[in-house]
Image: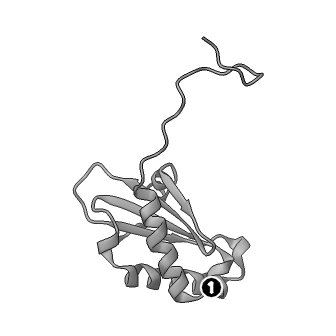
Amino acid sequence: MDRLRQRADFLAVANGARATCAAFVLQGRRRGDDGPIRVGFTVTKKNGSAPERNRIRRRLREVVKQAGVISMRPHHDYVLVGRRDALTRDFATMLDDLRSALRRLDRPAPQARNKARNPNGMTRP
């Protein structure tokens, strides 16, 4: 498992599927190459001071290590966007949240309706 480090890679993953949990948001995207699984971590400044953000990032890295590569899909990139709840959330619960989020990312997206709608909500023929 490799780390995402380039901004362009983070932006590409941001356009993919996403699953929300209390402690983090998991974003995922399939790549076109045969490279290894890559994981990136990010925590915004609104989540606290630098030591708090670093603690959130360390906890997220450890959750990914504990979950293991087995639950992640090959040839995919993942980004965990940390939230403030990651500081106080139980580690075992965060691990379950990650496994659950990975399963949600694997589900196919719901199909969009093909019928056009007018402003009143009625379908057109």
User: Which residue position holds label 1?
Assistant: 89
Coloring scheme used = one colour
Report how many numbered discs are placed on residues in the image: 1
Element class at badge 1: loop
Q: Residue furthest top?
A: 125
Q: Amino acid at mark 1?
A: Arg
Q: Is residue 46 above or below residue 109?
A: below
Q: Residue furthest left?
A: 34
Front residue of 70/54: it is 70
Q: Is residue 50 left or right of residue 37?
A: right
Determine crowd level at label 1: few under 14, some 14-19, many 20+ residues with C-alpha closer than 10 A. Answer: few
Identify the residue at image location x=47%, y=60%.
104
Identify the residue at horizontal 73%, vertical 25% (top origin): 121
Q: Which of 64/20 is in front?
A: 20
Residue 54 seen: yes
Give the position of the N terminus as an image quadrant.
bottom left
Q: Would you identify the image quadrant in which residue 87 lies?
A: bottom right
For the point 57% across and 21% down, which residue is it?
115
Residue 21, x across and y down, in percent: 59, 69
Residue 16, horizontal then vertical, whole percent? 47, 50
x 50%, y 49%: residue: 15
Q: Is residue 1 visible?
A: no
Please indicate whether residue 89 sits to the left or right of residue 72 in the image.
right
Q: Is residue 18 left or right of residue 124?
A: left
